[in-house]
Amino acid sequence: MPTKLSTDASIAEPITCIISDVDGVMTDGRIVYDDHGVETKRFHVRDGLGIKLWMRSGFSFAILSARQGNAVKKRAAELGIEHVAQGFEKNGLPRNHCLTPSDAVQNTSAISATICRTLP
């Protein structure tokens, strides 16, 4: 059963889904490669808590990233994020690609991304 937080603001009431980029939004923006050329990312636990509370309140969260990597898949799985789209060329993916039809309702999504200006 969704839990409505006492701090929910009426201004955010129409928002049912947050679509987030990863690099610089869910991470500190650094791209680090280990000695084997594997990309690593640094996620903050507070972001994870916020995402979990958002989803526990009955809302959707989606990840949309131009880059592709296993670290994002692992973090999404840890947090229970089902909608993940990675590895697309900019301007090549409409925002509803990573969402179910019920989530992809115009004017009910908040986009937190460095790439949001490229979305149709």
Image (cartoon, helix red, strand yellow):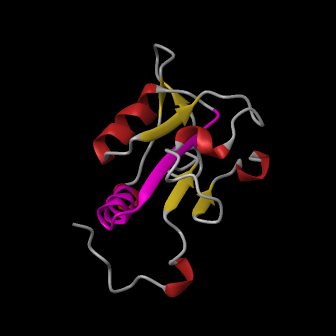
Q: Residue at x 38, y 45 (%)?
A: 81
Q: Residue at x 40, y 62 (%)?
A: 59
Q: List the single residue furthest toward the left.
A: 1
Is 96 above or below relative to 15?
above
Q: List the single residue furthest toward the top.
A: 36
Label count reads 0
- On whether residue 64 falls in the magenta region, the answer is yes
The picture quadrant where one finds residue 80 is: top left
Viewer-closest of 22 and 53: 53
Tell me: 52 left or right of 68.
Answer: left
Viewer-closest of 62 and 96: 96
Q: Residue at x 74, y 32 (%)?
A: 92
Tell me: 84 left or right of 95.
Answer: left
Is 13 above or below relative to 72?
below
Is 11 above or below relative to 57?
below
Residue 51 screen position, x and y as percent? 39, 59
Extent of the magenta region = 48-66
Residue 23 screen position, x and y as percent? 58, 44
Viewer-closest of 90 and 120: 120
Tell me: 96 left or right of 58.
Answer: right
Residue 109 screen position, x and y as percent? 58, 61
The picture quadrant where one finds residue 30 is: top right
The picture quadrant where one finds residue 110 is: bottom right
- On whether residue 78 falls in the magenta region, the answer is no
Residue 79 screen position, x and y as percent? 32, 47
